[in-house]
Amino acid sequence: MADEQLTILYMINPDPIFYGMMDQLIIETFQKLRVNVIVTELEELSVIIGNEITFYRKGEQIHFDAFLAYGYMAPKHYQDYMYFNFAVHSAGKITLHHPSTESILQNKLLQHLKFSENQVPIARCGASFSLNTFKQNLRRFNNKSIIKEVEGYEGTGVKLSINHNQSTELFCKSMWNGEQAIIQDFIDDTIGRSIRVLVIGGKAVSVTEFQDNVDFKSNGYSDDFQIQSKMDSEKKQEYFKIAEKACAAIDPHLTIGGVDILDSRKNGIVVLEINSWPEMTFSQDATGLPLFEQFGQEFIEKIISNNRERTDST
């Protein structure tokens, strides 16, 4: 709990398609932790940049210790959010993620490069930057493969291709739409199953299994979707260890990340990706753990630590 009065500028997600009540739950969490929360819309915000960076809401100057917005957004809204987020970080205030970390978290190709650099086990993937090189690299992948756009989220832009011709067609469609796509090995003994580890402050705090017998992506959009706690699993510590290693590859002090893992008999445990804004309600309901409160406390501790450092340096 905060031991001093802190103020968080909280921006309501302008595109709450995937997240429902998340904004309200997070706001209520901070209010219970005795934090002053200024709730704002993106369109109400502006910034003036000179010798100092000054922030405005509805044309009036505002003062706050940290800025937070949660959830995926439409491209233009996300671009504007990133501009404001960068300004907040540049002013020495706390944001959910460091801007450079955020850029990596929003891009599956960059994540895989960081995972490879830090020896995090992953499903092998390939990136090509023309149709010719894509066709040349196809022979290095099986007929059945995954084609995914590097900036997709919630399973959007992820397709299962059954042969090389279809893979080529999907890659061409992405190129036509101005999107970068990658090809990834299809791990066929984990269809409709994935492990989700929630990491807060660089430490794994919960693990669940997503199950779906209809959709191979197991991301919660079919009527068959289920989520089960794996907190009693004999593999819990193994899942925790690999999830923490994946997060550390991008940021050792990652505020929050939802690490998606496949547990394959053929390929072992491999990391798929880290979600920068993981949906917490599913995991909290399945495990019974106070995950919103843990997230709130971690964010508050970052604010307090940052304020002390700024005070000590003046």
Image: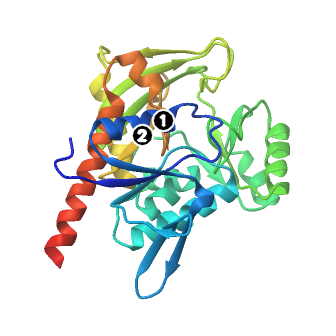
Residue 173 is left or right of residue 1, and the answer is right
Quarter assignment of residue 310: bottom left
Locate residue 277, reporting x and y percent. Answer: 49, 42
Picture coordinates of residue 175, whole percent (x, y): 80, 56
Real-space CA distance between mark 2 and mark 1, rounded to the nearest whole angstrom: 5 Å
Which residue extends farthest left? 312
Does residue 99 appear to the left or right of 43 in the view shown?
A: left
- Quick check: 269 above or below 13? above
Q: Amino acid at mark 1?
A: Gln
Question: How many numbered marks, from 0 up?
Answer: 2
Q: Quadrant of residue 166?
A: top right
Along the viewing direction, whichever of 33 and 71 lies nearer the viewer: 33
What residue type is disc 2 on? Answer: Ile
Q: Along the line of sight, which residue is nearer the eye, 184 or 79? A: 79
Badge 1 crowding class, 10 Å Cα cut-off, few under 14, some 14 to 19, many 20 or more, is few
At which x and y percent is residue 233?
32, 15
* Contact, mark 2 vs mark 1 (Cβ under 8 Å): yes
Whether residue 239 is visible to the viewer of this picture, yes or no, is no
| Quadrant where the image shows the C terminus | bottom left
Residue displayed at 66% across by 36% down = 17
Q: Is residue 115 above or below residue 198?
A: below
- In the picture, the disc for residue 24 is 1
Residue behind mark 2: 27
Give me the residue at 53% from left, 31% from top.
21
